[in-house]
């Protein structure tokens, strides 16, 4: 009888210790869960419910059903803003990813001054968007801007209005975004490069491979996971474009550089229509989710 009781006591003791461990773990996680529920989950649910109402500030909201979503389908400004955002995603993602990889290869090389270059490439990422755009607005302004002054010294006589035409305005936004964010991608690529064993390059050198062959056969395959991560982060960041056009061009000329986030902001805090703004926010959420899903599927196929 005694020998049969011991296993039961051991099981009970083990379960008590597991319960204490789980309780202590939940107590440590609880503050984060409370903050996450209050500041993340609750606003998402509240915003989703608001998208089905008139939701205007200062006026009692009324249930509007799918009215906001139906109006959105007919709103040319919504489609223009969404198209502007997709255009920026298409042009910015490959550009910033390629330059991030290029800079990481430079600072990972054996040339002198890589520490200075590494700091120079990364420091802009530490600046706020307001500081970044203020610097570039001074550089890009006509007549007294640094860039136009430099071009005049090189023989260009015409005054270039970088923020005055749609193509140049998009180019300016892309340049500012590249200068501001490429340092973060460089650090991610640099971490991946430093994980590649030197023995692989040494073996390739013995076999007579040149630098380009080493890059294509060793570096790129070894960085597939990092490249997939950087592309996904860059896609999401590009969809959230707001500060650069808002502070540089105001969405102009006209509304030709206004992204969807800026249109949502203006609808919510200029037109005071929180219901319609919430509806557009959820459509943007779905679009980002679809792009992320497609990217993950493609990444899995490439790695497979």
Image (tube, rainbow, N blue to C red):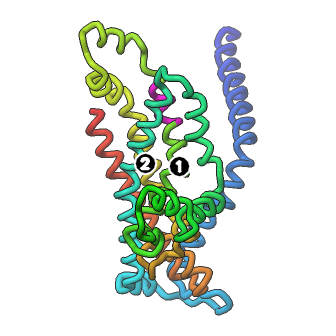
Is residue 231 found left or right of 177 in the rendered image?
A: left
Image mark count: 2
Q: Find residue 199 and report its horizontal and vertical position in percent.
A: 39, 10
Location of residue 11 by image quarter: top right
* Residue under pointer 2: 96
- Whether pointer 2 and pointer 1 mark residues with C-beta atoms closer than 8 Å, the reply is yes
Looking at the picture, does residue 5 appear above or below residue 32?
above
Q: Find residue 202 and report its horizontal and vertical position in percent.
A: 36, 10
Report the quarter where the C terminus lies: top left
Q: Find residue 88 and report its horizontal and vertical position in percent.
A: 40, 62
Assign the magenta stretch its main secondary structure. Answer: helix
Q: Residue 269 has which mark?
A: none
Whether residue 106 is visible to the viewer of this picture, yes or no, is yes
Residue displayed at 51% across by 68% down? 245
Mark 2 residue crowding within 10 angstroms, few (<14) / some (14–19) / many (20+) = many
Q: Helix or strand or loop: what does disc 1 sit on?
A: helix
Whichever of callouts 2 and 1 sits on the residue coming sooner in the sequence is: 2
Location of residue 143 by image quarter: bottom right
Whether residue 259 is visible to the viewer of this picture, yes or no, is no
Measure how far apart labels 2 and 1 are at the Cα level. Answer: 8 Å
* Residue under pointer 1: 181
| Magenta-tinted stretch | 187-193
Mark 1 residue crowding within 10 angstroms, few (<14) / some (14–19) / many (20+) = many
Looking at the picture, does residue 215 appear above or below residue 134?
above
């Amino acid at each position: 009888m005694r020998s049969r009781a011991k296993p039961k006591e051991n099981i009970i003791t083990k379960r008590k210790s597991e319960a204490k461990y789980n309780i202590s773990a939940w107590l440590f996680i609880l503050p984060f869960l409370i903050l996450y529920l209050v500041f993340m989950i609750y606003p998402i649910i509240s915003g989703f419910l608001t998208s089905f109402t008139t939701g205007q500030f200062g006026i009692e909201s009324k249930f509007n059903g799918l009215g906001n979503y139906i109006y959105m389908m007919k709103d040319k400004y919504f489609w223009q803003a969404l198209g502007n955002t997709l255009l920026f995603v298409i042009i910015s993602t490959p550009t910033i990813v390629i330059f991030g990889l290029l800079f990481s290869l430079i600072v990972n090389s054996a040339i002198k001054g890589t520490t200075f270059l590494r700091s120079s490439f990364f420091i802009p990422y530490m600046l706020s968007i307001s500081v970044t755009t203020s610097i570039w607005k001074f550089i890009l302004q006509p007549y007294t801007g640094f860039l136009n002054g430099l071009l005049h010294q090189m023989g260009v006589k015409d005054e270039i209005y970088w923020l005055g035409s749609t193509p140049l305005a998009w180019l300016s936004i892309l340049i500012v975004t590249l200068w501001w964010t490429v340092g973060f991608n460089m650090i991610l690529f640099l971490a991946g490069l430093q994980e590649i064993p030197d023995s692989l390059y040494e073996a390739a050198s013995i076999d007579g491979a040149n630098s380009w062959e080493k890059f294509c056969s060793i570096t790129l395959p070894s960085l597939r996971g990092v490249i997939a991560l950087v592309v996904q982060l860059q896609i999401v960041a590009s969809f959230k474009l707001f500060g650069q056009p808002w502070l540089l061009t105001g969405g102009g000329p006209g509304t030709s550089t206004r992204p969807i986030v800026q249109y949502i902001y203006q609808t919510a805090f200029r037109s005071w229509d929180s219901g319609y703004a919430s509806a557009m926010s959820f459509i943007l959420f779905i679009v980002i989710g679809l792009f992320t899903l497609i990217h993950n599927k493609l990444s899995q196929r490439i790695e497979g």
